[in-house]
Image (spheres, grey):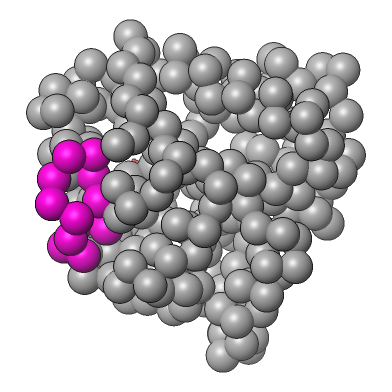
Amino acid sequence: MAEVVIVPDAARAGAIVADEIVALIRRRPDAVLGLATGSTPLPVYEALHGRIDGVDVSQVRGFALDEYVGLDPAHPESYRSVITREVVEPLGLDPDRIRTPDGSLAGIEHAGEDYEAAIEAAGGVDLQILGVGTDGHIGFNEPGSSFASRTRVKTLTRRTREDNARFFDTVDEVPRHCITQGIGTILRARHLVLLAFGEGKAAAVAGAVEGPVTASLPGSAIQLHPHVTVVVDEAAASRL
Ligand code: GLP
């Protein structure tokens, strides 16, 4: 059973998770962080900013969960750009130690395998930050994704593209494909920390934490993991 922490607001959630990450880096200077994009983890990155002074982060490694396919890595909404802007630069991490899946069309055939090998070579992820989609997706593993899946190319659902359209000018600009760590990849991280805020996430959170374990709600896979922390505000916890 996941440990569920209900907090008054996203800032408090960010502080709790940031404290956990700082403690991890102090214990293990070359810690491997599993980084997530989307709006949910931003309070964590902001809180880290205020806490990382005096902590040696030069050895910290990181792997992003996912990336759009076919979007120029220099595009401001590529997950490479987002991770650089929100995490790498403000926290002063070494960009060469932070990887995102290669979503370029040229390398796509081997990108999944290469990414898995890189995570493996790093010794696996110590702490994986997770958001959850309104349909229960984690990473970009949409409903129906196998719990054994590894990093691979997936097609985004209309709903996810609409949810993410706010980062683009129109929904048509949201790429149709992505490359994402699989649910099986995510489950191999040693500690999963899932965050969610707002009423819109309440059904996904309830399904993930206490619904049936089913591929129809990918987040429910966290119930198979021995070390999970779920940090949610009252609204996201309202259906628990
Ligand atoms: C995106 C990301 C997920 C993220 C989810 C929720 O599709 N690929 O990793 O968890 O959407 O996004 P948000 O945190 O903005 O609600």
Q: Residue at x 47, y 58 (%)?
A: 186
Q: Quadrant of residue 7?
A: top left
Q: Would you say 91 lies left or right of 131 here? A: right
164 or 237, which is in the foreground?
A: 237
Taking 70 as reference, is 24 above or below it?
Answer: above
Q: Does residue 137 appear anywhere in the picture?
A: no
Range drawn in magenta: 208-220
96 or 5, which is in the foreground?
A: 5
Q: Which residue is drawn at 60% across and 24% down?
A: 20
| Rendering coords of residue 50 (x, y %) | 69, 15
Taking 33 as reference, is 239 above or below it?
Answer: above
Q: Residue at x 45, y 57 (%)?
A: 187
| Rendering coords of residue 83 (x, y %) | 63, 47
Residue 22 among magenta residues: no
Count up the numbered dots.
0
Residue at the top extreme, as displayed:
8
| Rendering coords of residue 240 (x, y %) | 14, 28
Q: Residue at x 64, y 29 (%)?
A: 21
Q: Does residue 147 appear anywhere in the picture?
A: yes
